[in-house]
């Protein structure tokens, strides 16, 4: 692979029609050298801001002819290093591709460009009584293209799934500039291999997404929120397992451990009980009668599992305050130490109690500070290491703890990433999870679509 040359940079400027939309100065490039992942950074050779599919295609044709790697990114909120540049690469930033082309109420779809902010999609849908369920914690700043590329999840993943479940079509530009439309508005479509799904979660390694057709749902008529606090993390985890075993599928079942509760309270002052070992945020949506019934049932289960206190939000303002506690967890933990490493392990829900106990014991064993929160209803935990990347000895202990947590996750039948993607951070563990045959098949697919390995090289696998 060749680094971006002055000639290529001139071609990129010609492709987007404006030299000002190609950054090359070191100070301008610095913000594009990292994403939301700690301790991973590399300054690119240049950053280009296309505004149309045709401009993306022209940029890729030029980079392909020059043999120069291209890393695509949006807002840079990824948490697996998926959009961290490689040396000499072109960063193709899609934030200026932010048009909304169509909101189709007859077919319950919306078609947007990749730079549209995730929360904007749901806000537009809400104006006509519709609903876009995926809600990653970064929804106020993350872009929908990044969500599709990483197959992002969110707080409502338990009931509504992840981004993949809402993508009906997309425009993709291949490494040589070919433009493909994949999918349609049909609810049923079983024609051939599902190429659309191949690009969802491909982390920019197979093509560049330039339009997305998303499925919308009718907006739930009612929503109710409750909070339960516990003396032990295991009791909170057992409550989640009991709720699922009772065949209740709430839209949200979120977990915070004591470290996270204390940090959130110091950060947001929402009135959380800082003496509790853990809390669960429980939320139901749907028909009013069903919502009331599910909230009451979940509260009863929490009490039977030994909850110290159970409360319901009195109104939407109170519910927003409780949701804020969960949404601010990562930011609150990030204030404690210079470096915050957020993990993304996911286990079958019946194994949650064992997993949270193992995470706590492992971090004590290796003398590393951790706060754990996450989407416990779908088994997705975020053990968050609070450390300092300048301390090599401490970082070594963090790596040891992380490796043991990953091994335990896989031993319990889990996955190394529930919603953040593989990127650079989870790459060392992917073969362990998939096995040799599946892992090698992924690499064959990559080689077929990108023989020179120019698209986001080094991500998912080497």
Image (cartoon, rainbow, N blue to C red):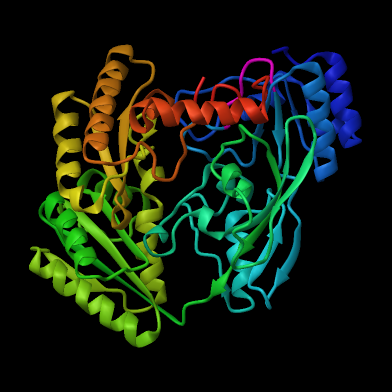
Name the residue located 50 percent from the left edge and 35 percent from the top edge. 36
Name the residue located 71 percent from the left edge and 19 percent from the top edge. 45
Q: As drawn, is 118 to the left or to the right of 207?
A: left
The percent position of residue 218, horizontal first and vertical second, equals: 54, 77
Q: What stretch is highlighted in magenta?
A: 83-89
Toward the viewer: 54 or 400? 54
Q: As drawn, is 250 to the left or to the right of 200?
A: left
Q: Is any part of residue 271 visible from this angle? A: yes
The percent position of residue 392, horizontal first and vertical second, equals: 33, 12
Q: Main secondary structure of the magenta part?
A: loop
Q: As drawn, is 403 to the left or to the right of 156?
A: left
Report the quarter where the N terminus lies. top right
Q: As drawn, is 449 to the left or to the right of 200?
A: right
**Is residue 307 a member of the stretch shown in magenta?**
no
Above or below, comparing residue 193 to residue 322 in the picture: above
**Is residue 88 a member of the stretch shown in magenta?**
yes
Toward the viewer: 275 or 374? 374
Above or below, comparing residue 116 to residue 75 in the picture: below
Toward the viewer: 387 or 154? 154
The percent position of residue 248, horizontal first and vertical second, equals: 27, 71
Please identify the quarter of the rendering in which residue 325 is found.
bottom left
């Amino acid at each position: 692979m060749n680094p971006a040359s002055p000639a290529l940079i001139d071609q990129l400027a010609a492709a987007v029609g404006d030299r000002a939309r190609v950054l090359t100065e070191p100070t301008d490039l610095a913000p594009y050298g990292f994403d939301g992942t700690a301790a991973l950074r590399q300054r690119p050779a240049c950053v280009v801001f296309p505004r149309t599919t045709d401009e993306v295609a022209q940029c890729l044709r030029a980079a392909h002819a020059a043999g120069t790697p291209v890393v695509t990114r949006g807002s840079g909120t990824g948490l697996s290093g998926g959009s961290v540049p490689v040396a000499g690469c072109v960063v193709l930033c899609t934030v200026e591709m932010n048009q909304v082309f169509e909101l189709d109420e007859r077919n319950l779809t919306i078609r947007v460009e990749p730079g549209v902010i995730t929360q904007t999609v749901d806000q537009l849908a809400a104006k006509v009584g519709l609903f876009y369920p995926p809600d990653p914690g970064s929804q106020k700043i993350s872009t929908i293209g990044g969500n599709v590329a990483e197959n992002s999840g969110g707080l409502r993943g338990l009931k509504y799934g992840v981004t993949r479940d809402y993508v009906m079509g997309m425009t993709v530009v291949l490494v040589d500039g070919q433009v493909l439309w994949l999918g349609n508005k049909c609810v049923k479509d079983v024609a051939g291999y599902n190429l659309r799904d191949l690009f969802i979660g491909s982390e920019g390694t197979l093509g560049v997404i330039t339009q997305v057709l998303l499925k919308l749902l009718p907006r739930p008529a009612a929503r109710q929120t409750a909070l339960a606090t516990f003396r032990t993390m295991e009791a909170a985890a057992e409550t989640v397992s009991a709720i699922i075993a009772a065949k209740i599928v709430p839209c949200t079942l979120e977990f915070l451990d004591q470290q996270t509760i204390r940090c959130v309270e110091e950060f947001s002052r929402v009135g959380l009980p800082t003496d509790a070992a853990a809390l669960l945020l429980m939320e139901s949506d749907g028909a009013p009668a069903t919502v009331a019934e599910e909230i009451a049932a979940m509260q009863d289960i929490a009490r039977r599992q030994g909850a110290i206190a159970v409360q319901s939000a009195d109104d939407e303002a109170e519910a927003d305050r409780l949701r804020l506690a969960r949404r601010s967890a990562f930011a609150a933990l990030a204030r404690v130490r210079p470096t915050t490493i957020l993990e993304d392990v996911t286990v079958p829900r019946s194994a949650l109690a064992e997993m949270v106990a193992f995470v706590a014991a492992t971090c004590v064993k290796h003398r590393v500070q951790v706060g754990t929160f996450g989407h416990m209803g779908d088994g997705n935990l975020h053990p968050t290491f609070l450390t300092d990347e300048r301390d090599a000895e401490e970082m070594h202990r963090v790596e040891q703890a992380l490796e043991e947590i990953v091994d335990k996750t896989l031993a319990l039948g889990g996955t190394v990433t529930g919603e953040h993607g593989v990127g650079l951070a989870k790459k060392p563990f992917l073969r362990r999870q998939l096995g040799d045959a599946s892992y090698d098949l992924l690499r064959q697919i990559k080689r077929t679509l990108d023989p020179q390995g120019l698209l986001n090289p080094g991500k998912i696998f080497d």
